Amino acid sequence: MISQSKFRAKPPAGNNPKYEEMISFAREALGLSESVSIELYLLEGRGSDRTFSRLKWKNKDSAILIHYDLTREENTYYAEIAVFLHDINVPVPRLIRHDSTHRLILIEDLGDTDLWSLRETTRENRRTLYRKTLAVVHRLHSFPEKDFHPDRVKLSQGFGPDLYRREQDYFRNYFVRDVCGIEFEPSLEREIEGELSNLAGELSGTLRCLVHRDLQSQNVMIRGGKPFLIDFQGMRFGSPFYDLGSLLCDPYVEFSNDQRMDLLLRYYELSNPKLSWEDFRNTFWKASAQRLMQALGAYGFLGLKKGLKSYLEHIPAGLHNLHLAASQVSSLPHLLELSERCQNNIVPACCRQE
């Protein structure tokens, strides 16, 4: 979860703009006079190259201020995407103002409740919230590509064989090698290469639509019983199954297989696809394996390279889900074997925060 600490005149992170600049931007955007006191609190706990702060004034009003750097180009896309999603009736925080020169974004404050924070709620309440989320996601997935205008809204490169392979390499380098300590012998290297290349090709051949790209429990805020999507700056065209795998095989939240299939069936009913239920389910598991490889690579990179040790805590759950996904289809035997080797190789201490 994101924690809150009082933000002082000298920001704790050196990549933040000056305190006065942030307050001045917010005051002008919100139409507040100099006589109104604004408090600013740093929100901690996210892995992206951005800082989040909560502004408070008049003891009741609030907004979220984002400062981004240019390390990731997708950070510059957030504001345009927010307006676009709002216009097509996908619930997201309302954009108040964007200053591209100083890289500041002011958005509506949706509070602190997300799907992750409600993971221990009653089974029926969680089912209801996830079904509502799937309806929102289906709305995004249903937007016709022919009606999208890339000259108005910039997006990251769409999913295709190259991007899927980059995610797979990310997994092999930062998780299999760095976390699990496994180096491939030549014969296994060729077998894994062929298997994952086929997976990339299969996923590239599925239905193409707009996808969130990081649709996990901490990126779905709940306000008034309704879901809102956040952290959508990585939105692009790709397979809807990637989003479904992100949400329903999320390492942060535990599902029984019955719960997971119940929710997947709900999306299947909403989308009315040409695929049979069996083919739909198989493609879901393949996309889930792809997404989980990306997530595990990220945990290894953020935990070991960036020093964000808390991400290592999610490795056991992510690896369990990867093993489950690979075991559900016949086309990923080497990935299944690799996930078992990783489970045997991981030292428990590496997955605990120091």
Image (cartoon, helix red, strand yellow):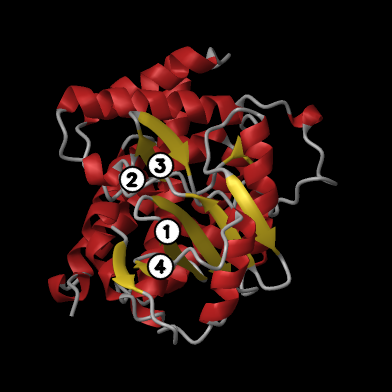
The image quarter in which residue 144 lies: top right
Q: Earlier in the sequence, mark 3 or mark 1?
A: 1
Q: CA distance from mark 2 to mark 3?
A: 12 Å
Q: Residue under circle 1?
A: 57
Q: Residue under circle 2?
A: 250
Q: Residue under circle 4?
A: 39
Left or right for 280, reference 59: right
Mark 2 surroundings: few (<14), some (14-19) or many (≥20) residues within 10 A: many
Q: Earlier in the sequence, mark 3 or mark 4?
A: 4
Q: CA distance from mark 2 to mark 1?
A: 36 Å
What's under tag 1, amino acid-wise? Trp
Q: Secondary structure at mark 4?
A: strand
Residue 178 place in picture, x, y as percent: 36, 77
Q: Earlier in the sequence, mark 2 or mark 4?
A: 4
What's under tag 3, amino acid-wise? Val
The image quarter in which residue 120 lies: top left
Q: CA distance from mark 3 to mark 4?
A: 26 Å
Q: CA distance from mark 1 to mark 4?
A: 6 Å
Nearer the observer, 60 or 199? 60
